[in-house]
Amino acid sequence: MPTPSTSRLRRRTTPAATAPPAGEAWTLPEPMLLGLTLLVAAAYVAYSFFSDGFYQHDEAAHYLNMRAFWHDPNVILGNWQKPGYKLLFVLPALLGPTALTVVNALVAAFTGYLAYKLAEAVGARVPLFAFVLLVAQPLWVQLSFRNYSEPISALLLTLAILLHYRDRRGIAALVLSYTVMIRQEFYPLLGLYGLWLLWQREGRAALALLVFPVVNHIWGWMATGDPLYLYTQIVGTSGTYQNAYARQGFEHYFVMALTIFGAVALTLFIVYLAQAVLYRQRVHGFILVPLAVYFLEHSVFQIESIPIGPSTGGNLRYLIVIAPLVAVLGGLAAERLPTLKPRAKLLAVLGPFVLAVLAFLRFAHNNITLTDEPDPVPVVTTLLAVALVFLPLRRRALLGATAAACLAVALLAVRPYTRSAEDAVMAQVAAWYRNSGLDGRPLLANHTMFYYFYGRPRQDFEPEARWITGTAVHEAPPGTVILWDSHYSYRPRLREDQVPHTYFLERPQQFRPLFDPIVTPDGRFGVLAFEKTAETPADSTNAPRP
């Protein structure tokens, strides 16, 4: 039977850091690393002025939800709301969208800082590889300053793994525990880490994993009265979104990985896997396993034949949660290259990869899937990344070449988002409402961008604005303004009790148009505005129904 001292020694040496590879090493002094991190954050903020459109409307909706917190803290409860994310951002949200842009950019940049520290903790000789491979990833750059939970989730996951490698298991467990208040997909990781901690006889750390799920459950129970709140949330999310969006197929994220992580980071990550198989190089399980579990989890959600879990629509941003881990492992692969003999063996893996890109990935994307439009960027950037692998350079020179390649890939692959025609219409509607003299009347409106461009969440209106539902329309007094849009106001597959625009048009004695329909040039989106002029008849057959 082991003594307590030998047991502690065994626990501490289980996930020990790798022995540093032979060859030159180069690390940055802490002030220089912090300065570089702040410089990257400033670059993200600067880019936000050029990319002033929206990746998705969720970034505006999250901002409004943060502001609504100050009216009712319970509004941030729920799977979409992500209370763990919102609690960290409700204070800067009070200062407005620009302040949030700066905070988001700092989160994205300091995730690069933590990727550097994690690479250093596992024995990297040039941990700056990891930093560079993260901060220049195309989708990471695109979302770096936007209001999404993925960057802060990535930061906390990286921090938890870093603390684990530094033998701070209790704090690592606490940080990982907090992540499930942001993303439910972390529950499998929570369970796996809990089993490992119990196997290592680290009971206190295992108990720490329960802290924030319990906090979330108690908060939800108090707010809703549901003693099974957490279970209801997890099961309810799968049920609500079971068929709400199209599933893209199990292979979806394998196909889109090049778009998400960029050619350089993805190629070097593939090289890392090849080094493990072909050269028997060490595998960093506490980095690779979370990466693989999270990736496969979202791939399973995309299976079309047997629906499992929520239908997430194949959103690419969900995968940037593991972007730092891809960068760290890719960085480790890169610094091994100068001492890897013979490098030609990598062609057994990289050759088929290039052929796959040429055959299947040489197309543009629409931020969800590939389109039929040819695009040379995936092929050009992949060839550039593969060529980088075979350059006969020492580590510091290879780092410079990698940074240059990452910059080139970013310049080719990152294209600023401009405001869509739908967003332009909603900005026009918000401006109309601001100048209409109708402020102060009851308002029914669903479109997120109306509230965003108007600068207020629903709760800031007096009286509080309501969603357009059959019940709300029926209860609305005469004088109520109704802003109906074709995107959010009628989605019967997702929400019940919504009202089609024909209901208002067929009842001119009760609803007066306030302006001619505003429609986008392609005819795919439109807004109608009505004033309710008479009470809805009490006869339930006349009440709004989808």
Image (tube, rainbow, N blue to C red):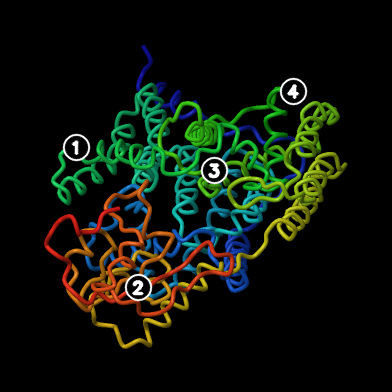
Query: Which of the 4 image quarters holds residue 447?
Result: bottom left
**Residue 26 drawn above or below residue 176:** below
Q: Which one is earlier in the sequence, the residue at label 3 or at label 2? A: 2
Q: What element carries label 2?
A: loop
Q: What element carries label 3?
A: helix
Query: Which of the 4 image quarters holds residue 76?
Result: bottom left
Mark 4 highlights which residue? Answer: 278
Q: Nearer the viewer, residue 383 or 84?
A: 383
Q: Nearer the viewer, residue 186 or 420?
A: 420
Could you say where residue 230 lies in the image, as x and y percent from the top left? Answer: 25, 39
Alpha carbon separation for disc pair 2 and 1? 33 Å
| Number of residues whose C-alpha sits closer than 10 Å to that of mark 4, classed few (under 14), some (14–19) or many (20 or more) | some
Kind of residue at disc 4: Leu
Mark 3 highlights which residue? Answer: 322
Name the residue at 41% across, 43% down. 244
Determine the residue located farthest toward the right in the rendered image: 392
Contact (CB < 8 A) between labels 3 and 2?
Answer: no
Kind of residue at disc 1: Leu
Alpha carbon separation for disc pair 3 and 2? 29 Å
Q: Which one is earlier in the sequence, the residue at label 2 or at label 1? A: 2
Tag nearer the camera, 3 or 1: 1
Mark 2 highlights which residue? Answer: 94
Kind of residue at disc 3: Ile
Q: Nearer the viewer, residue 273 or 258?
A: 258
Name the residue at 74% across, 23% down. 278
Mark 1 highlights which residue? Answer: 228
Tag nearer the camera, 4 or 1: 1
Kind of residue at disc 2: Leu
Could you say where residue 503 lies in the image, as x and y percent from the top left? Answer: 31, 62
